[in-house]
Image: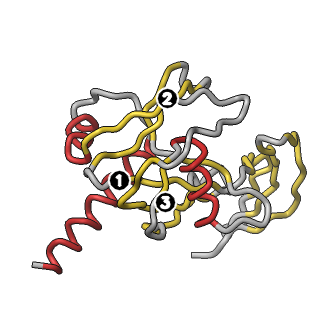
Amino acid sequence: MKKWKTVASEHIYKSPYGNLRKDKCELPNGKVIKDYYVNEYDDWVNAIVITKENKLVLVEQYRHAGGDFFLEIPAGKIEENESHEEGIIREVREETGYTSKRNPLKLGEFMVNPATQTNTVTTYMIVDAYQAYDQDLDDTEEIAMELVDFEDFGSMLRGNQIKTQLFTTNAYYMAKDFLMEMARRND
């Protein structure tokens, strides 16, 4: 297989929330796609945050495109001159007031949707978390925090008992798999 060749590229729309780019692409077989649209978004980070009592620290907020409230893990964009690890520590502290004396553990980095988007999400796990601060929300954020037993969250997901998004679900099962593997190694 060979990569596509970008013959031309122009921005249709630019905003602080993301850009829309139109590419003209030539495929390896010579076929040309004149209007291939790409959404350019900033990378972001998210984290499964687990307290010393084995509770998940979750945030509930209104998501306009989804038209409802969603229960999610803390997440956000990286700020300028900030590492991914610094970004997730800041986001967790701002959204929940939680922190940990232990460093975040990187579980993975993934393209969000490589067919049409340029951004990645880097997923972390933060353990032994405790609340040390008040929330410090932006003026566009209204976030309620909720603690849920780590094991119960899987049942909630499988039973469709909550509204959430794919990245929360993926991070939960990655963390669960990691913790089970660590437990097997310690036996």
Q: Amino acid at mark 3?
A: Thr
Q: Is residue 67 above or below residue 50?
A: above
> Which residue carries the number 3 mark?
123
For the N terminus, which image quadrant?
Answer: bottom right
Residue 158 placement (x, y as % from top left): 23, 37
Q: Is residue 184 left or right of residue 19?
A: left
Q: CA distance from mark 3 to mark 2?
A: 21 Å
Density class for disc 3 (Cα within 10 Å; few <14, some 14-19, many ≥20) is many
Query: What label does residue 50 carry, if any?
Result: 1
Identify the residue at horizontal 45%, vertical 44% (top origin). Answer: 73
Which quadrant of the figure has residue 178?
Answer: bottom left
Identify the residue at horizontal 27%, vertical 27% (top origin). Answer: 161
Q: Amino acid at mark 1?
A: Ile
Give the farthest residue toward the top.
67
> Which residue carries the number 2 mark?
144
Identify the residue at horizontal 66%, vertical 72% (top origin). Answer: 3
For the C terminus, which image quadrant?
Answer: bottom left
| Mark nearer the viewer, 3 or 2 | 2
Of labels 3 and 2, earlier in sequence is: 3
Q: CA distance from mark 1 to mark 2?
A: 17 Å
